[in-house]
Amino acid sequence: MMVRPVLWTLIGAAAGLSALVSGLTQDYTLAALGLAGGALWLLLESRRSDISRGPFLLLYVALAVIASLKDVAPAPLTLLALVCALAAWDLAALQRRTADAEDRAAVAELERRHLQRLGLTISAGFLAALIPLLAQISLPFLVLAALLLVAVIALSRAVAALLAGRDER
Amino acid sequence: MKPSLSLILALILALILIGAATLRGSVAALAIPLIVYLFAAVYARPETLRLAVHRTITPDNAPQGAPIRVRLTLVNEGAPLDELAVSDLIPAGARCIDGSAAALVTLPTGGAVELDYTIEALRGEYDRYEVAVTARDFLGGFELAAVYRTTPRFLIHPRYPKLSRIAIRPPQTRGFAGPIAARQGGSGVDFWAVREYQMGDPQRQINWRLSARAERDLYTNVFEQERVADVGLIVDAREKTNVTAPGESLFEHAVGAAAALTQNFLDDGNRVSLMIYGSGVERVFPGYGRVQRDRILNALARARPGINFALESLTHLPTRFFPAGSQLVLVSPLLPEDIAMIQSMRAHGYALIVVSPDPIAYEAQLGARLGSAAHRIAAAERRLMLRQVRQSGAQVVDWRVDQPLEAAIREALAAQPLAVALRGIEL
């Protein structure tokens, strides 16, 4: 059960970093909310509750958005809190999928491979997000708006194409 | 796409829109890890499932309650699968008693997963076995499910008690030595007749007492030959004679009784045949020994009560299937309209034993809401019907299925000595 300690660590890290970021923006209510959310999440994981963990991911994304809007805390800290929450959410889902499996050796192998690939994915996402945060680029508003529009359209079409391909199968 | 990835997609769009609305690139940049996560799931999604499924079941013939080992092997002949959930769907009537019928593994190309578990099953024929598989990407965002069907056949025989020897005496016997008095002189243990001494007769068979009274002749004792006989078992599988409740059926008791009688008569060396009369007429041709026992048990394993409007009464029972003068054993709860056919069988010269599971007592045992008056009337009707059957010369075993069959047979046949039964007199 190598996932459990990693999951708990990630929940703690997400809660702690969100609280720190909110504290730096002197918004202590949000900091307390971040800590309380983490404590509740840990409680649910310890009791192996079936309640969806989606609200916790939404909470930490919202806290990250608020911190980014206030633009006081270092952006990498905010980003790190978000990726920790994302990884914890993913591992919580994995733990629920593997809870009933009886062959613990096979599950351990599956968990090991999942942790490896999740680590690569999250790390790649974190580094990819750091680049625009650290590099200062000046873009005219219209160019920025056009880029954002292209990104949204491309993303939507990519997902629609994938869903269509899945339906055909 | 699972709801989890829909949430990620919604968050991505929300972050981009908030970033665009507030002109904060840092907010839009928060969407990048989520985008990378989404595309990792998309990239790793399972596209096709190519699995070779092989199943073995050991043994493929077993009595009810015996453990049966199931081994299922799936080999991945396609692309690697990050997560593969395998669940063997145990057929209705069977249950897993050891091991696990499910697994969750990661399966590379050429990799195999094996399920090895033990089940026990109720009486019946099982010819369809399905396994459900679900493949997912490593993030659990996309699923590809399939059901594979395999057709290993296995039969579960009915459970039956061991019976002590049942004395039968059909009009005709066969030419092989056995336990049944053949109404002919020959080698045996029971005194049959006396005849004049012939050269070569053993001295110990000379009846000295009778010979002493004769002046010159000697007389020899002749013993009754003991032979085997033809026994025909008839199992009534008409749906309208059956009484059912969730998980219970009177027909199961009838099948168990037929199996016990089969074993009993075959053990005595008799030639036994079977007919199952219900939705159709299934026959097992006469035979001896262990092979015949297996044939009959296989047929009983497959037997099911059914409806056939052409076979609603026993009138159409093809008695010509049974050799003339043989012993018939009818296992049936009986209906009043069956009496005519029983009388016909007796008139054709068959010796007949009727083993009748009592449906009235069975319904009461199941807790059916019978008013006491209705129950008494039904029981009285049944007694009257069985009396009529006895009067035709058949031996009747009125069997309450909550009591051992052995005791019911012994009690009934002791109360109806064969000679009395043949005269149609009720004691």
Image (cartoon, coloured by chain):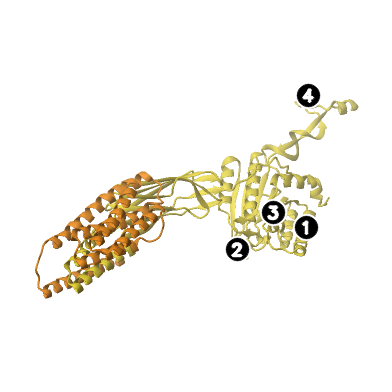
Chain colours: A orange, B yellow
Residue B35, x across and y down, in percent: 22, 63
* Circle 3: element type: strand
Question: Which mark, residue B307?
Answer: 2
* Circle 1: element type: helix
Would residue B112 be found to the left or right of residue B183 on screen? Answer: left
The tag earlier along the polypeptide, 3 or 1, is 3
Mark 4 Cα-neighbour bin, 10 Å: few <14, some 14–19, many ≥20: few
Residue B315, x across and y down, in percent: 68, 61
Give the amino acid at mark 1.
Answer: Arg
CA distance separating discs 4 and 2 = 63 Å
Give the amino acid at mark 4.
Answer: Gln
CA distance separating discs 2 and 1 = 26 Å
Q: Chain of mark 4?
A: B
Residue under circle 3?
B357
Between marks 2 and 1 in the image, the one whose residue lies nearer the viewer: 1
Between marks 2 and 3 in the image, the one whose residue lies nearer the viewer: 3
* Circle 2: element type: loop
Question: Which mark, residue B383?
Answer: 1
